[in-house]
Image (cartoon, grey):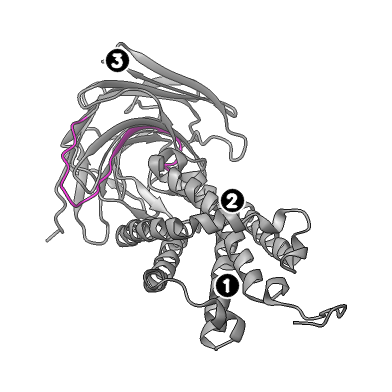
Amino acid sequence: MTQAGQICDCVTDESSTSGPPGNERLTTTVGLVLLVLLVVETLTTLSARSLLPVHVFLGLLLLPILALKLASVGWRFVRYYMRNEPYRLEGPPRLLLRLLAPLLVASTLVVFGSGIALAVVGHGGSLFIVHVLSFGVWGLLMIVHVLAYLARTLRVGTADWRRRADLVVAGAGSRRAALSGALLAGVILALATYPAQQRWLSHRGEHRRPADGLTHAQVVGVARHDVFSAKSSNWAGYAASAADGSPAVSFSSVSGAWRQPATMCTVGTPTFSAFWVGLGGFSGTSQALEQVGSQANCSASGRVTYSVWYELVPAAPVTIKLPIKAGDGIAASVAVSTTSVTIRITNVTQKKKTFQRRLIMASPTPDVSSAEWVAEAPSACAPAGHCTVLPLANFGGVTFVVGKATGSGHAGTISDPAWSATAITLGDPDSGSTNATPTPLSADGSSFGVTWIDPQPAP
């Protein structure tokens, strides 16, 4: 107490800049922002395929804000256990929250750490499982954490943004600056890495060009003298291109049809497959690939999903809203004129529903050095370019028919004498195993099949 008329010049913890009240305001304000952003981030997982770009962008944006929250909580933890009197007087959190706190921090670090690792090294089975499982644990812990602190967060979280906030707890301006700085740092980080994000998304396991090391050799046992063979780690089918030493062929269109094979799934093993026609991507120096097709992917639960897509590499693949199921007949084509690419695909079984779109490829320009008809094991690639071929789904077999192309103004089938046809076998060049192999071309050179093979190492 003070005597009447005497002015007290003491400063209590409630008006201190660095005391528990200021720390609480910073923690709750950052927590409120994190809560909103994390809700949005969690909602993107409901449609992981279409919202994955948003998921990755938000994940990077969240990192500086998350770091500020951990720093604020960590400061309170350190001050309390170093027996700082104001923090000791505030007391510890409730026992349950104290027990859950280390698990929440650990799961948060694992979720975001594994997410960053996935973006750096590409899709990996065990790494992806760690990310998904840690997200599940983190989600449960976050529910408990949010429910425990929600009322206080809503009450205190906006206090520093009200008028005359400094009169109640000093340092409001510094706390606002810290949060604004973290938000700005997150935006800068997300925007600065945006090109790398797009490269990763465009390579993340949808439809890639053949792996490096594609080698050509004369086919043994194929009647056609002009058909060569190659082995790829992710393609099976045929490619048409200029023969070695011959003038270049500029392909302006490719077309073909197939019946979507019924894919067999095994519980516990995610597998992937794609079937498409396209231009470019066959050469080891290719920088572009224009393709359209269908795919059948198996989840770890043994569920198969069918879909239709197109992709203009290096841009990300685009899912086409076209109905498809096993057994449907699919007809597809790609046409290129300078930088204009026309994609067309029709489900001839389901009332001939058709998707057609004209797109522009300015940089890089379309690759028209080859035409392909392919069954593929999609690959997952890191931003740096390292790719990992994903397990090929057991599609049994698929038959491509009416395979045609137009090159340098000449229209012909896959084996037309105006270009050279290459039969591509899908296999592991290291172990020597084969996973899919094409049949010889039909007599008119327009049809062939691709057969799935249970991969066994070569003797």
Return the x and y of residue 117 as percentages of the image width and height: 44, 63
Residue placed most toward the observer, 228 or 137: 137
Kind of residue at badge 3: Val
What residue is pinned by disc 1? Answer: 71
Q: How far apart are marks 3 and 2 (CA)?
A: 39 Å
Residue, x 48% and y 60% (percent of image)? 149
Rendered image: mark on residue 340: none
Rendered image: mark on residue 194: 2
- Split into 4 quadrants, where in the image is the N terminus? bottom right
Q: Is mark 2 on a helix, strand or loop?
A: helix
Kind of residue at badge 2: Tyr
Return the x and y of residue 299 as percentages of the image width and height: 25, 45
Does residue 271 show up magenta in the picture? yes
What residue is pinned by disc 3? Answer: 348
Q: In this view, does 223 lie above or below 435?
A: above
Instruction: Characterize the local packing of mark 1: few (<14), some (14-19) or many (20 or more) Cα atoms within 10 angstroms.
Output: few
Q: In this view, does 341 lie above or below 222?
A: above
Residue, x 66% and y 61% (percent of image)? 179
Return the x and y of residue 67 as percentages of the image width and height: 56, 67
Which circle's residue, 1 or 3, is located before the other in the chain? 1
Q: Which of marks 3 and 2 is in front?
A: 2
Q: How far apart are marks 1 and 3 (CA)?
A: 59 Å
Does residue 350 appear anywhere in the picture? yes
Return the x and y of residue 25 as percentages of the image width and height: 63, 64
In the rendered image, the residue lying farthest to the left is: 459
Residue, x 74% and y 60% (percent of image)? 165
The magenta span reads 261-282
Residue placed most toward the observer, 321 or 256: 321
Which circle's residue, 2 or 1, is located before the other in the chain? 1
